Image (tube, rainbow, N blue to C red):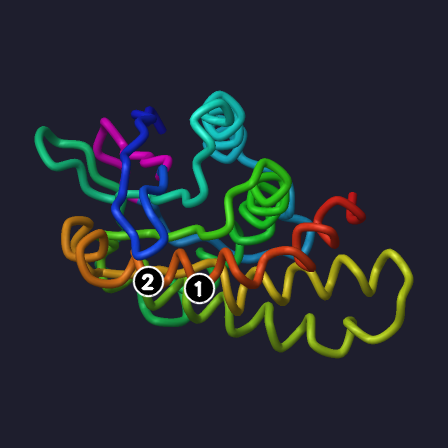
Amino acid sequence: MTMDFDTLEIETPGGPRTALVITPVEDVVVSPRRYSPDSAAMSESDQRILEGARDARSASASVCIFRARAPVGGGAYRFEQTMSDAEAVSTALTMLDGQLRVYREMLRLGICLFLHTDMDPVAVHGFRGAVDVRVEELEPLTFGVGPDAKKAQLDLWLLRNLNFFFSLAFEKLIATILPDKLILMEKRMERIRRLAHEVE
């Protein structure tokens, strides 16, 4: 998937903040995929997104927004609309573990919120369902102080608090939800950033 990377200044109650905005520049339709537990590798798109975040480090971006539909042109990312609910969740699960690796690294780079806007309803259902599945699997693994428990704690916190999928339009998200949400998350980030640096 070919993507455009840009930064945007957002006015918040705590002053201006910088967002890394990622937008597809081609039409991408995701077909149904069967989930396998060994599908945790980062995809080529994941790696490109992480490279874009590293390049944006000098801009001190504190939020990453994946804009699933370009404002002009044909760029769009969507799930095949004939997918069943179960197929959508399975398809999202095949991508979620690789994406979690990206989110962990972004936390280390100072980004504290990962938003996906302009998503089609099938993809929103799929990713939200995949997050629910992964949260249920992670909860029993969070007890203890070893590396596996710390990783589970980090991923659980990421999925519950920092990663959101919306069909809401980009412009409305920027105007109504993001400013207050971003300031709220910044106040809660010290512990989770420390944990991100402890987890491989």
The residue sitting at 32% across, 68% down in the picture is 84
Camera-side residue of 73 and 32: 73
Are the residues tagged 2 and 1 within 8 Å (C-beta)?
yes
Percent position (x, y) of residue 94? 53, 52
Q: Report the amino acid beneath label 2.
A: Asp
Q: Main secondary structure of the magenta part?
A: strand
> What range is drawn magenta here?
19-29
Kind of element beneath mark 2? helix
Percent position (x, y) of residue 29? 27, 42
Percent position (x, y) of residue 51? 52, 24
Camera-side residue of 112 and 87: 112
The residue sitting at 84% across, 59% down in the picture is 148
The residue sitting at 34% across, 45% down in the picture is 30
Rendered image quadrant of residue 125: bottom left
Q: Which mark is residue 184?
A: 1
Q: Disc 2 and disc 1: Cα gap in Å?
A: 6 Å
Which quarter of the rendering shows the C terminus? top right
Q: Report the amino acid beneath label 1.
A: Leu
Q: Which residue is mark 2?
A: 180
